[in-house]
């Protein structure tokens, strides 16, 4: 499906440009896709030669319908095919298998016998996933940052809430170049799950970051408050346990003291009574 859309885009670009000037056909493709570089020599190629070059490197040489691999650069060895059944109609297109970012560059299709050449600029891109993070707590909300590096083909980036509604932000566009970095910041004022999305119409479509829950400063304060409540609880329980322990210890102390004391009193009264008995005995003896 993606290959199809890539191919159709390539063809559209090709047709669109050939009516104007022949140079400067641009083709875009995602990494790891097969990409067709179109070229038409407008003469039957079964007994002719055509050659593809990229920055002085040999990409593909076809002589009398046969591939000549001897001079082919190792970057392209085993990765490029042509369309043998279409040589009759002058179709000198090639397909590069599993395009790499390093395949990007300017290609030239040379129809050697008719001395015509066509230039194609190929850009192979990746569709990197954006990242999201909270960067700062403000009075009115939280500043959230979306970031993407090496994004491809002038994408735009947005910060969205859980209902996919876009939050107002600046710097949502790539400034220049095919592979660009975008960093955008926006202030969110509601607790919600947020995500960043990189949008690129033709190739990457929409790439989402992870979702992240953003709490408002007041809520995170409550959360801190909650932690303090926890501490208070621990302290309260500690105090209660302390009081109970002290009460138990005091109770035992008092209990033992009371027992010892009453023992002493018992002893004293016994002594007194025996003294009384002795006295009695004395008085008895006296009397
Ligand atoms: C050449 O052949 C390929 C493969 O069938 C096709 O996709 C492409 O459209 C043709 N190109 C031209 C210029 O006819
Ligand atoms: C391809 O050629 C164009 C025009 O000459 C140039 O602007 C561009 O930088 C070249 N691209 C690469 C990848 O070399
Ligand atoms: C938001 O967009 C994503 C991707 O298109 C979709 O899966 C999800 O259901 C959407 N969520 C809502 C709430 O519309």
Image (cartoon, rainbow, N blue to C red):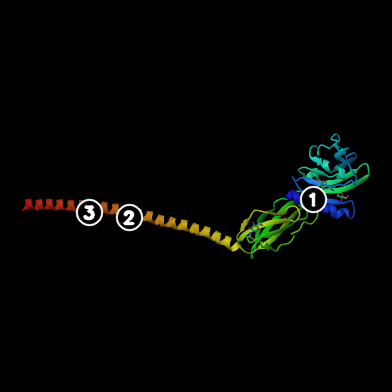
SS of the residue at dot 2?
helix
The residue at the point 73 percent across, 56 percent down is: 199
Residue 213: give its label.
Answer: none
- Mark nearer the viewer, 3 or 1: 1
Q: CA distance from mark 1 to mark 2?
A: 89 Å
Query: Alpha carbon of mark 2 to alpha carbon of mark 3: how far?
Result: 21 Å
Q: Is residue 54 visible?
A: no
Quick one: label 3, few (<14), some, or many (20+) residues within 10 Å? few
Q: Are marks 3 and 1 in contact (CB under 8 Å)?
A: no
55 to the left or right of 168? right
Give residue 116's position: percent from left, percent from top: 92, 46
Q: Nearer the viewer, residue 73 or 158?
A: 73
Nearer to us of marks 1 and 2 is 1
Give the number of the disc on residue 265.
3
- Callout 2 crowding tier (Cα within 10 Å): few <14, some 14–19, many ≥20: few
User: Nearest the camera: 138 or 263?
Assistant: 138
Q: Earlier in the sequence, mark 1 or mark 2?
A: 1
Which of pointers 2 and 3 lies earlier in the amino acid sequence?
2
What is the number of the mark on residue 251? Answer: 2
Disc 1 is placed on an element classified as strand
Whether residue 221 appears in this view of the structure is yes
Would you name the residue on which mark 1 appears?
Answer: 28
Tell which of 102 and 221 is nearer to you. 102
Write the residue at 32% across / 55% down.
251
Secondary structure under the numbered disc 3 in the rendered image:
helix
x, y (%) of residue 67?
Answer: 84, 37
**Residue 175 placed where, x, y %?**
79, 57
């Amino acid at each position: 499906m993606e290959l199809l859309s890539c191919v159709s885009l390539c063809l559209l670009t090709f047709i669109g440009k050939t009516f104007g000037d022949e140079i400067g056909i641009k083709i875009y493709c995602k990494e790891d896709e097969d990409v067709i570089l179109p070229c038409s020599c407008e003469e039957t190629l079964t007994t002719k030669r055509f050659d593809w070059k990229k920055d002085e490197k040999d990409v593909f040489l076809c002589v009398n319908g046969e591939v000549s691999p001897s001079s082919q650069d190792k970057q392209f060895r085993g990765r490029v095919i042509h369309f043998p059944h279409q040589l009759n109609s002058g179709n000198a297109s090639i397909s590069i298998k599993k395009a790499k970012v390093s395949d990007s560059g300017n290609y030239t299709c040379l129809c050697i016998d008719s001395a015509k050449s066509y230039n194609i600029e190929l850009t192979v891109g990746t569709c990197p996933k954006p990242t999201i993070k909270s960067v700062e707590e403000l009075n009115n909300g939280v500043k959230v940052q979306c970031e993407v590096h090496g994004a491809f083909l002038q994408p735009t980036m947005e910060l969205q809430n859980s209902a996919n509604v876009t939050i107002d932000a600046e710097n949502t566009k790539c400034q220049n170049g095919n592979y660009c970095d975008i960093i955008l910041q926006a202030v969110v004022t509601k607790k919600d799950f947020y995500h960043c999305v990189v949008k690129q119409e033709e190739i990457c479509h929409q790439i989402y970051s992870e979702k992240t829950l953003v709490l408002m400063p007041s809520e995170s304060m409550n959360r801190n408050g909650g932690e303090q409540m926890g501490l208070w609880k621990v302290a309260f329980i500690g105090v209660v346990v302390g009081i109970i322990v002290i009460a138990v210890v005091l109770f035992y102390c008092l209990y033992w003291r009371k027992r010892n004391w009453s023992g002493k009193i018992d002893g004293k009264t016994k002594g007194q009574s025996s003294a009384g008995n002795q006295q009695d005995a004395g008085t008895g003896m006296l009397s």
